[in-house]
Amino acid sequence: MAHEGLRIYTHLYIYTTVPEESMSDVALKPHWFQVLLALSAGPLHGTAIMEEVLERTQGEMKLWPGTLYGSLRELAGQGWIREVEPPEDAPTEGGTRRFYELTAEGRGVLAAEVRRLAGWVEAARTRGVVEGGEPA
Amino acid sequence: MKPGPLYRGVLLRLFPRRFRERYSAEMEETFVAHLARAAGPVARGGVWLGAVRDAVRGGLRERWREGRDPDHSRGGGGMHAFWTDLRFAARGLARRPGLTLSAVVTLALGIGASTAIFSVVNGLLFRPFPYSDADRLVRIWAEHPERGWSETDVNPADAWDWRNRSGAFEDLAVFNDLGIALTGGDRPEVVAGVVATPNFFDVLGVPPAEGRGFTEADGREAAPPVAILGHGFWERRFASDPGILGRELILDGEIHTVVGVMGPGFRFFGGHTDLFTALRRNPSTHPRGSHGMEALARLRPGVTPIGAHEAVNEVARALQTEHPETNAGWFASVTTLRDQALGNTARQASLVLSGAVGFLLLMACVNVANLLLSRAGTRRGEMAVRTALGAGRRRLVRLLLTETLVLATIGALLGMGLAEGGRRLIVAGLPDTMPPVFSFELDLRVLAFALAVTLVSAVLSGLLPALRTAVPAGELRSGRRVGGSSRLAGVLVGVQTALAIVLLVAGGILARSVVAMRTQDFGWDADRVLYVFVTLSESRYPGAVEIREVEPRLRAAVAGVRGVEAVGAIQSAPLQSSNWSTAVTVTDPAGEVAERPARVGYLTPGYFEAMGIPVRAGRDLSPADGADAPPVALVNETFQRRYLGETDVVGTTVRDAGGAEVTLVGVVADHVERGVDRPPEAAIYRPMAQNPTRPITFAVRSAGAPVAVAGAVQEALWSVDSDLPVREVTPLVDLVSSRVGGYGLIAQLMGGFAAISLILGAVGIYGVTAHSVAQRWREIGIRLAMGADRPSVVRMVVVHGVRRAGIGVLAGLALAIPLSGALAGLAVGVDTRDPLLFAAVTATLGSVALVASWIPARRASRLDPARTLTAD
């Protein structure tokens, strides 16, 4: 019993090294995070988001159509992204392509998530889990 | 069809309509973009697989969401209607508990049995072995087709040439499993060891959990001996001592340093193993010609086992010309590790038992279909009301199918309990000769199978009745009877009877085969024989002289034990899984001289007596056949018949593999040696004194139960050599049981399925007869009123019922005769087309049909005509 308690304390200890404001947030789903990150540089349409994420994660995260458009719908429902007019020079494939951009709220959520993750990485690093100071 | 439209036409349909309308064009574009990035058919297959998974998951998620979202639920489509149907079906079933219960139990039996069998088949055929990328692991054997030798041990030097010259392998290791004497503790022990080239664990792709693996340096001749322990042995012998690394063990008299411990999940595919040592010799320095080790290799990526087979044999052919005196006639064969571990019997059993549960499941579905059909008439009113309220036929069918889906789902949940129990029973009953690399845990594949079986049984048992029940309104109004349902039921009963016949025949054949295996004439008398297996270590008994000196003393000590009637020794006794063979040059009756393969036994006087094997001609070996006496041998009857003809062979000579002339002094009776399921092979028996061996099995015949003398025999051996490691003490009857065990399990399962099929068949025939009697209620009433006597009514109903079953019996026999051929490999020593068995099965099922139709017939004959005529 005592051991259970001790274990919980070690976890809390990790959390306390994380910046305050992110502590209230639950982790973002990984593919939501990637979609938001992809949109942080500017408006993109669905397939372009998929490709951006695929390349940036070196093939680690494949956004399949159902997951991708389901996420876009939900993220828009949350108010974190919104549909925008396609950029002037972009091919629209006969009007079927919808472009999305990050809302201010979405940008905030993304930043909070990044801070949360950074806090964990920092906590791990101070414990010597990862060697050196530079991320691989 | 192009991928895009195919995706749109099939996978996108899994998403709800609204989602599809909004996103389908873009989803297709994204899918095509994924596909465009895939190079090669394998990668494209991966994309399709990913898209299927995504569509199933995404489709379910979106439908679930729309179903919950009040804004969407008015759409009338999909999920909402399904929930309504589900509620309705559940209510309907609760109103008919009798029907619900029997259908659920029947489906639970069918689904449970098939899932239990599949969970075992899954372990045998699909679940990966505990090695990295295990699909690329292969075993390589030597073979000599001319002499009829296959799956023979390899020569290490040959194997090293295959490794270095074929180009087919990433790496190849040679190894040998053997008993290693562990001394220096309080009690000498023979541990199950594997000596292997240092790359052994690299080939398997599994490093030790603690310490290090073998290095190339460990394989040099002068290297200090090292050992890696199996996890179980480390626990058992060293109480999981964390300081084990660096400890020294005396193995076969030599000090070995422990350098590693394998993880708890590691299993050697050859069987239980306590420890591993490195072969301290370059394999290519082994003399060619002797075949005493085994080979394991990892294929290069992209190389198939067949490709490797060809590449290895190309090298083997080159070696034949390079070393004609040792390699002439030697080839090699490559089999995957799984095929090797599985063996033919288990593979065939998987197939046969899968077929059998398939039949059982079909029978269960037919039963439920019949049950539902019998209610079709009574639900006409309900259907009429629903039609009047605007439900189309499709909707009614869907509703009724939802009902069977509910039945099947409840059945499946119950069946899962049965399946899990069954799986445990089967796994516990697997023979211990089974390699320990198979695992039978439940996994996603089993769950997916159970799900698929549930859906299939829902459709199989529900579709026909649903089509019959959901009759269009017009036909209802016309007041026409929903006819034909009884004819359909009759057909279904026929199908069921046919399936039951097939299962009964299969069960009968396998049961008889097991009985035949157990009761066959082994040629020896197992009842009171004990095997005591020892290994004479090289350090204590360096050569032939020492072995010749100690063996008779050991034997004499055992003979002196109270309760021991006879004792003899042999290097490899029947059913011990070792397979010593040699080539003998004989002159056949036509005067032709030829080299012939034969099993070889090196044994002492007293062995045949202890085993109860009669000498048919000439004499047994005697103590006079010593090292310096002229070489002599006995042969078995098969050797005599096959190679020498029916002549009197005593006194004639043959040449052994070394070229020495050997006089045949006797012929012994054929007896089971390699397996209870194999016919005797030609064998030659030579005096151990003339050919000493390190492994020795003492065959001990006791006056009473063999286990009673086991302890005393062991003490007697230790009185001669207190460090003598005794590897195994086993009554021969136990070996027989364990060898028959696997077949016994198959027969028990098949017998169980046959019994269930008989019950299902009886219930089916009873149900249909009872239903048809109920439909003919009025007709029977009229007949009785017109003066028909009761026996004639009984006769009429019974004849009708039996005729229905009879057609099924005929169809079943027609089906069983070709199908029983599939059992040929599993049924040993019985005729799979034995007419007596077919007759017995027909009689059994016939009497079941008779009883099952007689019960409702009797009830019909007791009707009160007045009541039936005024009813309705």
Image (tube, grey):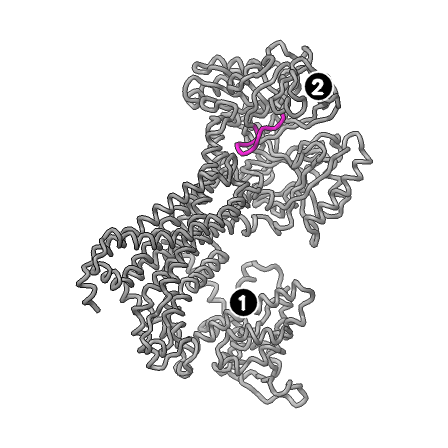
Which residue bears the numbered disc 2?
A: B654
Which residue is at the far front? B786
Q: Indicate the amino acid at tag 2.
A: Val
Is B801 drawn above or below residue A88 in the view shown? above
Amino acid type at circle 1 is Arg
Q: In which quarter of the image is the N terminus of chain B?
A: bottom right
Q: Which of marks 2 and 1 is in front?
A: 2
Instruction: Identify the main secondary structure in magenta.
Output: loop
The percent coordinates of residue B706 (x first, y second) are 44, 22
Between B590 and B47, the residue placed more toward the observer is B590
Residue B764 on the magenta segment: no
Q: Start and end of the magenta stretch?
A: B673-682
On what subunit does the disc labeled 1 rest?
A: B
* CB atoms of marks 2 and 1 within 8 Å: no
Which residue is under mark 1? B53
Q: Position of residue B575 (x, y in %)?
A: 54, 29
* Mark pair 2, 1: CA separation: 69 Å
Query: Which quadrant of the view contains residue B554?
Result: top right
Figure check: B17 above or below B197: below
